Image (cartoon, rainbow, N blue to C red):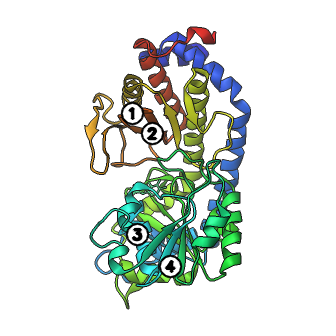
Amino acid sequence: MDDIIKAQYERLGISGEVYEFGKKTEEVLKERFAEIDRRAEYNQMKVLKAMQDNRVSTGCFQMSSGYGYDDPGRDTLEKVYASCFGGEDALVRPQITCGTHALALALLSNLRPGDELLSPVGKPYDTLEEVIGIRHSKGSLAEYGITYRQADLKSDGGFDYEAIRAAVNERTKLVTIQRSKGYATRPTLSVERIGELISFLKNIRPDLICMVDNCYGEFVEEREPLDVGADMIVGSLIKNPGGGLAPIGGYIVGKKECVENAAYRLTSPGLGKEVGASLGVIQSFYQGLFLAPVVVSGALKGAIFAADIYEKLGFDVIPGAAESRHDIIQAISFHNPEALKAFCEGIQEAAPVDSYVRPEPWAMPGYDSDVIMAAGAFVQGSSIELSADGPLRPPYAVYFQGGLTWYHAKLGILKTLQKLKERHLVNMDSLW
Ligand SMILES: *Cc1c(COP(=O)(O)O)cnc(C)c1O
């Protein structure tokens, strides 16, 4: 069997040497992979329980159109999300166009003029700068007279409790906590640390609304932020919880009041959750959620596999190969633009879709340098599918994530290694 697998990889352009290196790496990671599998098993049972408790039936998959009144599929799905993630209520809709939209919705609906928003974990994700109004934008919170304050993390990544205490004032209404590092270099927050931060905040003011940007974090651990005191979690369905099947969508799960506010803003005051046709995509939401724990486990294995390989080859990897994981993103700093490009070309060549195109660095809105992106996805921009990108500026770091199956993630990473080796950008001799 081993021989025919190796031959199959060879047909995909993976040399014997690279294949063997991958195999050796996989051996070393056996125990960590087993741990990831156990967590996936736990989360699979969690999802199943939520589906059974809420009596999901084939009738739930019927499409609604027009106003979407009385759509049992939509309403049941929201109950499933609430049960699964531990909230009182949920809003899970194809009308929420992406993660940024879900976050903007949660903020704009739960804050009022004169309120203040606080980020106690430093600068939030790039796209939120415009939502908040850190960078001027039409329709931002700033335009509505909602102010913003931020407490940076300490240089060791710890919470700056003094600065946080000083930042909370009588106008502070909502606290936004980003779980994933996103495209920053700080560590991702574990659910445990999020819990500690929330306890601290609620001790200062029990009525603070604690929102967690849960993007890339779902199903990575056994617990989710609502289990440790968050009032609201927010995320995208073309990341983890959509399981690669949801073609669009976002969610907000949490306290009834928070979710209701969001629903009345998404549709209209007076209408709230009562309208919003599901237009035939609802089955993919259910099926994607059902598969998500296993899909996330494959992405996690890919991230660890890459970290181990590139750490051995002498590159800076965040997180390190042996570190515990709290999201699915892996960063590798190449300190060399050619290596960054070669990596992205490898990921692209491994894709099931558009494998024959070559990614080129390009100017992107919001970036001050060219950016290279590799994605051969079934769903445009889906980052639970294997994808990589990085700005062409020092330290020439690539951020990569996803992989609907572990085997695909593995091929992607072996492809990157093959490319770097062929271009003499890595020296594998020292490893043997
Ligand atoms: C992806 C992401 C977002 C924004 O989601 P989009 O779907 O790209 O708009 C926000 N926060 C974090 C941490 C993310 O990873």
Quarter of the picture holding the N terminus: top right
* Precedes in sequence: disc 3 or disc 2: 3
Mark 4, residue position: 259
C-beta proximity under 8 Å, tags 1 and 4: no
Spatial CA span between label 1 and label 2: 8 Å
Q: Tag 2: residue type?
A: Leu
Q: Nearer the viewer, mark 1 or mark 4?
A: 4
Q: Nearer the viewer, residue 336 or 279?
A: 336
- Left or right of 52? Residue 351 is left
| Residue on which the image places disc 2 | 386
Q: CA distance from mark 3 to mark 1?
A: 32 Å
Q: Quadrant of residue 17?
A: top right
Task: Look at the numbered discs 3 and 1 and tell me whether their residues touch, using CB distance below 8 Å.
Answer: no
Q: Of circles 3 and 2, which is in front?
A: 3
Q: From where the camera sits, is residue 277 visible?
A: no
**Residue beneath the point at 31% across and 40% down:** 369
Spatial CA distance of label 4 from label 3 is: 13 Å
Q: Amino acid at mark 4?
A: Val
Instruction: Please say if 22 is above or below 151.
Output: above
Q: Is mark 3 within 8 Å of ligand 1?
A: no
The disc labelled 1 sits on which kind of residue?
Answer: Ala
Q: Nearer the viewer, mark 4 or mark 3?
A: 3
> Where in the figure is residue 129, as x and y percent of width and height?
39, 61
Q: Left or right of 103: which side holds 279?
A: left
Disc ID at residue 351: 1
Marks 1/4: CA–CA distance: 37 Å
Q: Estimate the x, y position of residue 199 in percent, counting from the top left.
A: 71, 70
